[in-house]
Structures are given as C-alpha cells and as structure tokens.
Amino acid sequence: MTKGNINVSVENIFPLIKKFLYSDHEIFLRELISNATDATLKLKHLTNVGDSKVEFGNPQIEVKVDKEGKKIHIIDQGLGMTAEEVEKYINQIAFSGAEEFLDKYKDSAKDSGIIGHFGLGFYSSFMVAEKVEIITKSYTDAPAAHWACDGSPEFTLTKGKKKDRGTEIILHIADDSTEFLEDSRISALLTKYNKFMPIPIKFGTKEVNVALPEDAPKDAKPEKKTVDNIINNPNPAWTKQPADLSDEAYKSFYRELYPMQFEEPLFHIHLNVDYPFNLTGILYFPKMSNSDMNIQKDKIQLYQNQVYVTDNVEGIVPEFLTMLRGVIDSPDIPLNVSRSYLQADGAVKKISSYITRKVADKLKTLFNDDREDFEAKWNDIKIVIEYGMLSEDKFFEKADAFALYPTVDGKYYTYEELFNKIKANQTDKDGKLVILYASNKDAQHSYIDAAKAKGYEILLLDSPIVSHLMQKLESTKENITFSRVDADNVDNLIKKDDTKISKLSDEQKTELETILKEVIPSEKFMVQLEPMDSDASPFIITQPEFMRRMKEMQATGGGGMFGMGNMPEMYNLVVNTNSELVSEILATKTKKKQERLITQSLDLARLSQGLLKGEELTNFIKRSYEMIK
Ligand code: ADP
Ligand code: MG
C-alpha cells in the first residue's frame, strides 16, 4: 500500500482563481473595500477592548483612479499589517484573517460586523490586475511593509516607507480590464455594492453650495466649496432600532433604495432577529396592480453585513414575498452554494418561515389597528396575500385574521363575517353554503342585479389567481362552494322558490323544445326550460362553474392542470317559460318569424355575457336596425 498527499501546487491554482473563482470580475472592488472595512472595524474593536493605544478618530476609505498610470488605489486607515502578518494572511491563499480574528475575540466581536470569511477575497484583485502592490503600516510600532506580486506565485516583500497606519492596495489594471479605469464605472460599482457599508468611502470630490448668512442680499450668489464625495450611507435604516425611526425615516430610506421610484410604499415591516440566526432588514409593500405580477419581482436586495450581494432572493424569501421591496441583511445565508442546495438548507428554511410569520403578524396588526385604512389598501396588496394563501399553508391559516372578501357594493368581509352573513339564506339543495361572486362588475351587471334582487351578497373577486384560491378555500373550509353570478349552479339557489308554476303545459314544453332545437346549435348550448318570474329575461346564458374555473386555472397555470387538453366551450341556455316572449315564440305561425325571434333572443343573451363578437356581432346589429325601421 502506498500513502501520500495529493500535491496541489500554487502554480496551478493561481490561474484557476483568476478565471473561475468569481464569475463576475467586477466584485474585486467589493472584496477590497470589504477588507478595508474589516481592517477599520478590527481596529475599532481593538480600541474598544483596550488592545490598541492609537487614536481611532474618524477613519475613512478612499478609492482613487489613476487613468494615465492605469492604476486603482484603495486606501484605508485600519489596523494595517506587519511584514509577518502579510506573510501569514496574504501569502497563504484560503487562510482567512477575518475568521481568525473572530475566533480570537469570539463573543465580544460577534456583532462587530466583520465581513471576511473564506480568505479568498483579496486574490480576486488578480482578475483585473496584472500586478498588485500592498503598502501597509501596522497600528503597532512595527515598520511598514511593501508587498508586490505580478500574478505568478512569486512575490517580493520589502520594507515600506509608509508613516501613518493603514493599508494602500495598488492595482495595476490589466489591458483586458481597462473599463475599470473609467470614473463612471467605478462610481456605478460603488453605488451598487457599497452604498450602505459601515465606514465612509470617499471617491473624488464634489462642489456644494455654502449656505448664505441670513442677512445676505437677495441677489447674492451662493458660494461653492469643494468637499469629499462620500458615496455611502454608513448607518442605513435597517441597522437601527424601529423605535428610533419615524414613518418619514422609513419612507426616505425607501427613496434611497429606489431613487427612480416615485410612488410611496404602503407600509413597511422591520425584521430583526438574532436567534437562531442573524437577520435584519426592512420590507416594503409597494402598490401593486393586477397586471404586472412578474415585472415586480426581484426588487429585494440581499446584504451581508451591509455589503450588497444580490437582488435575487429566490429560495431565501418565500416566492410570494418576492413581489415586495426592501433589504435583507444576514451574515448567516450561505451564498457560495447553489440555489437548490439553499432551498434545502435548514437555516435558510427557518429564515424563510420567519419572514412569512413576520409579514402575517404585521398584516394582522395593521388590520386590527386601523381597519378602514387596511380596507382602502386592500386592492393594492391582495395579490401578495392571495398568492401567499395559495402557496404557504402557514400563511393561509394566519390569513383568516386579515384576508378580506370585498363585495360588489364596496363592503369588506373577513371570511368569518361573510360566513355569518350568508349562512341563513345562501345554501343550495344539498345544504352547501354558496358564495356568490362576480369577476367583472360591468360584464356581469345583469346577473349581479338579478342576484341582488334576491337579497344575495355578491363578492367582487377579480385577481388573476382567484380561481386557484377558491379551489383551495373549497377544499379547506367545510361545505362551501363558490359560484360566479352567471354560473349554472346559481340556479340551484335562485330556484329555492321551487313552487313557481309554469304557464306552459307539458305538451307546450315539448313543442317549445323541438322548435328551439331546430335553431340553437346543440354542440354549443344545453337548453333548459325554467319557469321564472315573467319579467325576468327570456333567455339567460350561464356557464358551468366547474368548466369555467378549470379553464381559468389552465390559463394561469399550476396545480396539475396541464395536459388536460382543450376544454370545449359549453354553455347553458336557460329559457324562461313564463316570459311573454316565449309565449309569443310558441304562438307564431310562420317558421321564418319564429326562427328570427329565437336567433335575436339568443344573440341578446350572448351579448349580455360578452359572447357576441366579430361577424356575428355585425350581423346582429344590422338585423336589429332592420327590425326597428
Ligand atoms: P478574508 O477577508 O475572507 O479573511 P481575504 O483574502 O479577503 O480573506 O483577506 C485575507 C486577509 O488579509 C484578511 O483576513 C486580513 O487579515 C488581511 N488583509 C487583507 N486586506 C487588508 C487590509 N486592507 N488591511 C489589513 N489587513 C488586510
Ligand atoms: Mg476579504
């Protein structure tokens, strides 16, 4: 048997790091600024615990672009490194000084906000630089050190001349990466990744107006002065306590996050846990309309210790909440793993269910505290809530406390209120509670009117996924069924007064059926004769509730609805045998005239269901003009 070590040489690893370590070359800047931030936070911590005698002051990080010299400088005033420390931390790839620091100061440094983790960040600079220099002076008395490396495993380490503490990293930008020598590119990167990092970051200078003294003459021109251009807000709202933030502060942070967004958010949820995982953040409910469910996704930004990571929070935030906006910051989310692994990760699952619970609790509080206001916002938030009820059982259970069911008359019921309201007079023959709803007030106007006349309560349910939600409610709540006002099973309700006497004899009914069948295509309409009030419409088209809903669910996707084939268009034609028009049809002797009466009535019924279109509609209008001439 032979035993041995697999020999991984640095020579082989180096080009690999350069090529594959990070898919995005631009993140080198984020990594170097993270290191500069860590160095500053470490010094702050050492000062706090009395391990450093230096004056901490107000350190900042500076980024400088030297386009002519093809260099980028990143300069910090952190704890710096001795020559020995450079050997230890820089020359050993994958040895993280951040990890070591956190280990050493364990409890006290837990909340220091130190970012580094894997000991690989520094080498990302070789993705864009052909040579990297480190000039660093430790906060201790040790002399400065100067390290340089041209991307081969060889490096030089000499004494440096630097007098003040801190580190300067110099990147000699490679020819294939000169895009990073543009101020605009660097400025955009800083805004993207570093906008909320905890140490002030200076990039160039800017001119600002000096405030004029109060007694200045009216036409006095404000004087300009040049100040440091600080690109970040080191104390973003999510790092503060909710008690220290006003409503206006939350809104102004929203504008900071989305400068191009002019609409104000409806409300916010402040997230804050430290056990069993660390997470802070603020989520905002934006105004949301029915149509743009998908465009609205991917607006939540994910941070780790105030460093921007991504705006793809899939797997971390439950799907239905990806329509919200805001920030989540957690050092505990493993980001170096694949998304599918992420979804299986226990910690991440806990984060996801914590967020769901927080959102549900907040909605409940809002509902209880100011119901009127909540009702006014319902239309803009219902998509998220209904989507959540569908996709997360936990949320579904909690939603009973705040999910609303609006009526066509602008009332809003909770499920329980609705139940109590209709239980007395909206049951069908089998004793099932029938919840009537309309999906479009205009299109179903005549049906709504008819149902209202019977004293029924009609909901207005018009979001795109509501058919799925009804299916879910029917299977979880006991003994209920939803019926659109123009659906066939509404007849079961309306017919409750079954005692209505038909004006027609049985022979007349048979005769009527025969006449109707000759004119009305049987593959499209199932004809039913019903004795209704004489002033109710003579012809009414209804659609089987079951069939329409299947079609809707097919259209909006989901739940095993695929591969069902195309359902045929099938309608019921309810003919009111007590109407005068039907008597007239029966009494008419000429076949032609009889046919015309039926066609015209059928078209009117189709028209009121919005089913008359194109050529058929044109013909109908022509025919109608002929008739009134
Ligand atoms: P990580 O940040 O994950 O520890 P890096 O590869 O980014 O790994 O950096 C390696 C180590 O080099 C850091 O942990 C730190 O000890 C040291 N280092 C890097 N940049 C600086 C800096 N600007 N000031 C002081 N030390 C630094
Ligand atoms: Mg690092």
Image (cartoon, rainbow, N blue to C red):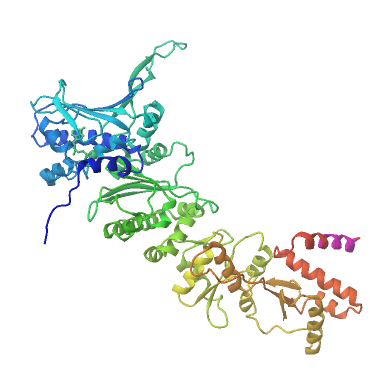
Q: Quadrant of residue 220?
A: top left
Q: Which residue is at the front of the view, 521 or 140?
A: 140
Q: Quadrant of residue 493?
A: bottom right
Q: Quadrant of residue 340?
A: bottom left
Residue at the extreme front of the image, as rendered: 1
Residue 491, position as x, y percentages in the image? 64, 77
Q: Quadrant of the N terminus?
A: bottom left
Q: Main secondary structure of the magenta part?
A: helix
Q: Quadrant of ligand 1?
A: top left
256 falls in the magenta region = no
624 up-or-down from 374: above or below: below
Asked whether the viewer can see residue 293, the reply is yes
- Report the span colored magenta: 620-628
Asked whether the viewer can see residue 186, the reply is no
Q: Is residue 279 left or right of residue 502?
A: left
622 falls in the magenta region = yes
206 up-or-down from 587: above or below: above
Q: Is residue 109 left or right of residue 369?
A: left
Q: How many marks?
A: 0
Q: Is residue 430 left or right of residue 60?
A: right
1 up-or-down from 35: above or below: below
Residue 400, position as x, y percentages in the image? 42, 65
